[in-house]
Amino acid sequence: MTSSSLSPARRGFLIDAALVAVVLVSGGLLLQPGVFSVDESHYLLAASAMAERGSFQIENGFEALHAPQLLFFYTVVPDRVVELGTVWTVPPFHALLAAPFVWLE
């Protein structure tokens, strides 16, 4: 059976199937675990803190080093950073719902 004997619909289906296979294999080989955006990283930090310690405090080394580089957006309350350390300041409902799933991981 040659390619010229295939109907156009059948040929299109085979091309589409080959393209999907290439995309899936490429995606599997190039996949890097992690977050897609900065917002997702803050929500993940919050969920991890809640799952691991049941607290709002994020342990990223700031308490030991007091390095300002470890204070990034949405993880500090600027006027209380010495008292609180790094805490997540995103809405708490996501962390409360996501913590059991992070804990299971």
Image (cartoon, rainbow, N blue to C red):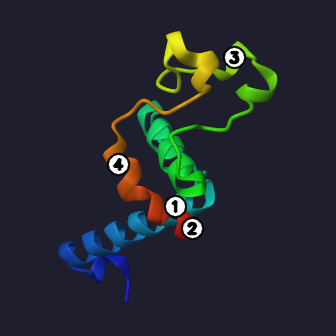
In this picture, residue 22 sits left or right of residue 67:
left
Mark whose residue sits in front, 4 or 2 = 4
Residue occupied by mark 3: 69
Sequence-first disc among 4 and 2: 4
> Given the image, on which type of amino acid does mark 2 rest?
Glu
The N terminus - image quarter: bottom left
Q: How far separated are the C-alphas under marks 1 and 3?
A: 26 Å
- Residue 4 position, x and y percent, is 30, 76
> Given the image, on which type of amino acid does mark 1 rest?
Val
The secondary structure type at the circle numbered 2 is loop
Which residue is pictured at 48% across the width and 33% down the height?
88
**In the image, which disc is placed on residue 94?**
4
Looking at the image, which is closer to me, 39 or 86? 86
Looking at the image, which is closer to me, 43 or 29? 43
Residue occupied by mark 1: 102
Sequence-first disc among 3 and 2: 3
Q: How far separated are the C-alphas under marks 4 and 1?
A: 12 Å
Looking at the image, which is closer to me, 88 or 5? 88
Q: How far separated are the C-alphas under marks 2 and 1?
A: 5 Å
**In the image, which disc is placed on residue 105?**
2
Sequence-first disc among 3 and 4: 3
Q: Do the residues labelled 2 and 1 touch (CB within 8 Å)?
A: yes
The secondary structure type at the circle numbered 1 is helix
Q: Is residue 60 above or below residue 7?
A: above
Q: Do the residues labelled 1 and 3 touch (CB within 8 Å)?
A: no
- Residue 74 position, x and y percent, is 47, 25
The secondary structure type at the circle numbered 4 is helix
Question: Crowdedness of circle 1 by 10 Å Cα count: few (<14), some, many (20+)?
Answer: some
Q: Which corner quadrant of the image does residue 104 belong to?
A: bottom right
Question: Crowdedness of circle 4 by 10 Å Cα count: few (<14), some, many (20+)?
Answer: few
